[in-house]
Amino acid sequence: MHLSIRHCLLLCILQISAVTILIAEEPISSFIAQASAEHPRNSEGDIVVLRDGTLFAAWSQFYGGAEDNAAARIVAVKSTDGGRTWSTPFTIQENQGKANVMSVSLIRSSSGDVLFFYLIKNSLSDLKAYVRCSTDDTKTWTEPVLITPEPGYHVMNNARIIQLKSGRLLAPVSTCGTVFGKDDPFRTVVYRSDDDGKTWQRGSTFLAAPKRGAMEPGLIELKDGRVMQIIRTQTGYIWHSFSSDGGDTWSEAKPWNIEAPEAPTTIARIPGTGDWLLVLNPVVEWKNPEKTVLGTNHGGARTPLAAMISHDEGKTWSKPKNIESDPALTYAYTSVTVHQNRVLLSYYVFPLKGKQLSLKFKSIPLDWFNR
């Protein structure tokens, strides 16, 4: 009788454990920041894992409207339960621009410090990138260091900084004299630092693409030491280029083998396996004069949000697997952080007919992308 009860108890414990493991292996979703009248736009964020396992998320919190030039500051929250819940937001960079500060990149350097990159926007012809450093795990930050001193408009997307195996930091930028200026398309250029972000040098090569130009570049290091750059364009394809000297000079930009609308795409390497993860909007639909389709001014609405895996450094890819698929919502400006066999994502959620953007979080097991 007692043996039977013990067996029953053991069975119950095993069943509960199995359910717990199953839950732990499923995606976790939450909102880092939901849009409101006070803060109509929350976007362009990134996530870094602190030494004690706490998730630290920072993003652009707009308070003067939802347009790109509206007033915004950079705020942060923390999560101690894997992203299920988040703390009250606190400011880490007040607005120092005539327009805003925005577009966060966070990276834990090989030195152990946390680096915090952001943009200060003054006008349509004055946008510059800066970096601050924390040696105490985000408690305090150093004074900002200017990355892009040259005149002009310098766009660096959120979650774009990479550190090479050599220790060099690379900051990919798309630049022009004035946004929407006549005969002034965007070109990409890469800035580099060999002293953990204290000083920066601009690369030698500017890359071009048709129409509005070469926009919102992203970077990934190959196993052979080369660096690949991916580029947003208006051609219906992601473009790409390679550097064999650590990001200084680049091959001519050409269309890659991935179709995409005019939207940012995020690329990252999975530690351990070396696989590449691409997060993108995979549907391309250019404006048809006979048919009005929401979102086609960008070559397609930014929905769904999907992921693709490559086991051979971009030669071949898995079919797109939807992370988000509601056709009434758009999703973009994704950050990717890999931690303990999970991919931590942040991205904006923007209704097709809406005016407010929320920042969503999703934690997905690595094996989900290969299921």
Image (cartoon, helix red, strand yellow):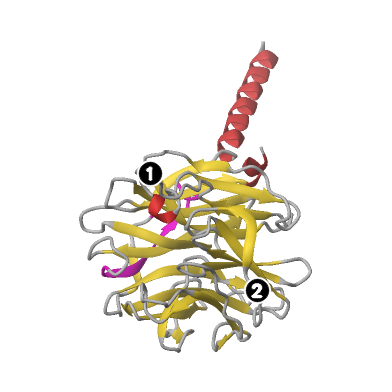
Which residue is drawn at the image coordinates 55% and 35% (left, top)?
23
- Residue 286: image location, x then y, percent: 45, 50
State the CA–CA distance, disc 1 to disc 2.
35 Å
Can residue 85 be seen? no
Is 83 in the magenta? yes
Which residue is drawn at the image coordinates 58% and 30% (left, top)?
19
Which residue is drawn at the image coordinates 64% and 59% (left, top)?
256
Left or right: 41 as drawn, with respect to 313: left
Where is mark 2, residue-wise?
252
Q: Which residues are magenta?
A: 70-86
Where residue 303 sits, quadrant-wise, is top left
Left or right: 14 as drawn, with respect to 141: right
Q: Residues within 10 Å of mark 2 (few under 14, many from 20)?
A: some
Is 132 in the magenta? no
- Residue 195: image location, x then y, percent: 61, 86
Looking at the picture, does residue 299 appear above or below residue 145? above
Q: Split into 4 quadrants, where in the image is the N terminus?
A: top right
Q: Residues within 10 Å of mark 1 (few under 14, many from 20)?
A: some
The number of numbered discs placed on residues in the rendered structure image is 2
Q: Secondary structure at mark 2?
A: loop
- Residue 99: image location, x then y, percent: 28, 75
Q: Split into 4 quadrants, where in the image is the C terminus?
A: top right
Looking at the picture, does residue 185 appear above or below residue 196? above
Where is mark 1, residue-wise?
329
